[in-house]
Image (cartoon, helix red, strand yellow):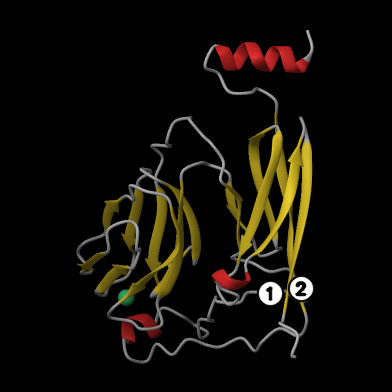
Amino acid sequence: MNKTIVNILLISLGISSVFAGEVKGNVKYIGKPPKVKSLRMDADPVCASAHKEKAKAESFVVDSNGNLANVIVYLKDVKFSGKTPSEPVVLDQAGCVYTPHVMGVQAGQPVKILNSDATMHNIHGLPKVNREFNFGMPKTLKEKTINFDKSEDVFVIKCDVHPWMKSYTQVFDHPYFSVTDKDGSFSIPNVPDGTYEIVAWQEKFGSKRTLSQKVTVKSGEAVVNFEFSRPKKK
Ligand SMILES: [Cu+2]
């Protein structure tokens, strides 16, 4: 039986295509990277003493080969009717830094927020589509679980006690997203065969300068690479 017939049979049974592949690749920054800034945590001795060396800002993490971390890479406008994961995504407040700095989550999926510090954090999320949230996490409150009902483009989650604490979250209505590692790599598994728009977002470049291209998945691996660069001066 050929693949098309199998697919039609499966779709008629309410099962989405079994032909799927992995979309993977690498994100690079071309150009001289900006200087890495240290975070000034002097305002809270608990935060400052958590770091032997000063913690570095994670808004632009690039290695000596130009590999760019903390980039959200995702497929745009994908239909997905599968289950929402019950496994939580974890956002930790440790050493007065959010880990991860950038994350993706599915709508309805639990987000477990941890306070690993012996200090007070006030976690303040600024989504526009989902409901804004803002609550204190004293050192005695070690975890709290929230979730986002709707898919939404990236927004800030910050701490109102420690102004340097910022993280970015995007909510998806499908599981086809990834965040680049320190080596700039990403992997989106189990993507059904098809042609998609794939988007890369990095916080310094913002929503106006997201990169996008087309990718076709056909029972196997599709490799997509992105390159961010400084805007050319006119
Ligand atoms: Cu804080």
Q: Residue at x 78, y 82 (%)?
A: 31
Q: Is residue 199 above or below residue 8?
A: below
Kind of residue sitting beneath label 2: Gly
Residue 176: x and y, percent? 58, 44
Q: How many marks?
A: 2
Kind of residue sitting beneath label 1: Val
Residue 15: x and y, percent? 55, 18
Q: Which residue is mark 2?
A: 66
Q: Between residues 152 and 25, which one lies in front from this camera angle?
A: 152
Residue 99: x and y, percent? 46, 64
Q: Residue at x 27, y 58 (%)?
A: 131
Q: Which mark is residue 114?
A: none
Q: Between residues 44 and 49, which one lies in front from this camera angle?
A: 44
**Direction front: furthest residue:** 234
> Badges 2 and 1: C-beta atoms under 8 Å apart?
yes
Q: Between residues 227 and 160, which one lies in front from this camera angle?
A: 227
Per the image, label 2 sits on a secondary structure element best described as loop
Q: Is residue 85 above or below residue 116?
A: above
Q: Which residue is mark 1?
A: 62
Quadrant containing the C terminus in the rendered view: bottom right
Q: Is residue 135 above or below residue 129?
A: below
On the picture, is 208 further left or further right than 68?
left
Per the image, label 1 sits on a secondary structure element best described as loop
Distance of mark 2 from mark 1, alpha carbons?
6 Å
